[in-house]
Amino acid sequence: MPHRNLKILIAGGGIGGITTALALRRRGIDAELFEQAEAFRQVGAGIQLSANATRVLRTLGLGEALARVGVYPEGRDYRAWDDGDRLYYTPLGARAETQFGAPYYHAHRADLLDVLLGGLGEEGFRLNAHVDAFKQDADGVTVTLADGSTVTGDLLIGADGIHSTVRGQLFGREQPRYTGNVAWRGLVPAERVAHLDLGRVTGVWMGPNRSIVQYYVAAGRTFNWIGISRSEQPARESWLAEGRIEDALAEYAGWHPTIRTIIAATPRVLRQALYDREPLPDWRVERVVLLGDAAHPMMPFYAQGAAQSIEDAYVLAGCLAANPDEPVAALERYVRLRQPRTAWMQGLSRREEELYQMNDVAAIADRNARMRENRIPESATFPPEQERLYGYDAEAVLRAG
Ligand SMILES: Cc1cc2nc3c(=O)[nH]c(=O)nc-3n(C[C@H](O)[C@H](O)[C@H](O)COP(=O)(O)OP(=O)(O)OC[C@H]3O[C@@H](n4cnc5c(N)ncnc54)[C@H](O)[C@@H]3O)c2cc1C
């Protein structure tokens, strides 16, 4: 039954905003989403989707569509940058799916977007609709769009990314923190790297001051790599900033031939500065709340930014469905359930930089020895951190809290 009196406005049509619109609709709650761009868009790059996210997407009815476009990795393979020695291995595939109750996938972002939009359908959003500002009172929220028009609803969700306008108006326009790292990205037609026998794994290569993560996407037709390297000079913080192949090769000079061959085979490289923010203790002021990167942007080392926005979306919709007559209290509950977990992830993601990108030779040798010793045998259980991360069941969280 639709909740007739509740209309939710959503600023931003990224993975977080679209999943929120979808999750609300599945609960019978009316939502309208405003995206500034003229079309929904995701950058040409890969994305890892862990069990905590795919469990939600499956519950939203997208499991089969996701399985059609996703690549199902067997494990995560950590390697040394120079000789390619395997340092550590975490099983994924069927073993992780059994353990965590949902699959782990690699996907092309455009494919994920198609899956989400397939669920959303043709209604409930406006493109070319930049949310400029909002006003709220005891009865509702009114947003003003860039064309001067206004729209009124009961609540506003700011899912408008790391530079969120909604966050700026709620809590002040503070710039995000430059992390001192840039990300290099490339997509390579699979046939160009077929001879490298890269396997169906998430490959993680760790070297001094830089790292590379790589995996197949698009049902195996395309190979994706993301390099992260320290840089004093931030590049443009845009997904679409072009980089140069020769610069990427220079950045990974001396690295294992596998890595250099992959980079050299890449038709087009993107280079983007990485920013994050400190955890925000509260994401809400009365009828307006934040979600996804607008609330908790994080470094990409745990591949969790989008996954956390998907969890947010499901929990938010569940809180509103459980208490539609008191939507402000429902938002409060949503923040209480979600803020501690995402703050934990923001902290872990920052700390992981040190593990991936250390540059002291003795420290690297030490880390490598530790990783080799601690490799997870196929029969062992997963580390507690992974249990907490991938085992998260948004539905159970709603039931318990
Ligand atoms: C290098 C790298 C690798 C990553 N890898 C992974 C991974 O493997 N797995 C994972 O889970 N996460 C990953 N992430 C994180 C993930 O990409 C982000 O966390 C996720 O895309 C955030 O989604 P979002 O919807 O919150 O924000 P965004 O994707 O930023 O979407 C915000 C949307 O709002 C729109 N918008 C902005 N302002 C307004 C406005 N005022 N009015 C209307 N519309 C507006 C924008 O056009 C945009 O469409 C990675 C990030 C990086 C940088």
Image: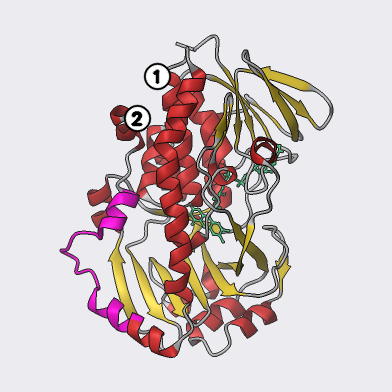
Q: Which residue lies most toward the left here?
A: 379
As drawn, 58 above or below 69: above
Number of marks = 2
Q: Which amino acid does label 2 sit on?
A: Leu
Residue 80 appears in the rendering: yes
As drawn, 176 above or below 207: above
Q: Mark 2 points at which residue?
A: 398
Residue picked out by circle 1: 322
| Badge 2 or badge 1: first in the primary sequence | 1
Q: Residue at x 46, y 79 (%)?
A: 358
Q: Verify whether residue 372 appears in magenta.
A: yes
Which part of the image, by quadrant, shows the C terminus?
Answer: top left
Q: Is residue 220 visible?
A: no
Left or right of residue 397, residue 253 in this image:
right
Residue 240 is situated, as x and y percent measured from the top left of the image, at: 71, 59
Which region is colored magenta? 367-390
Q: Residues within 10 Å of mark 2 (few under 14, many from 20)?
A: some
Cα–Cα span, label 2 and label 1: 9 Å
Q: For the residue marked with disc 1, what is the amino acid?
A: Ala
Left or right: where 128 falls relative to 22: right
Q: Who is closer to the viewer here, 106 or 20?
A: 20
Q: In the image, what residue occupies the spot 70% across and 58% down? A: 238
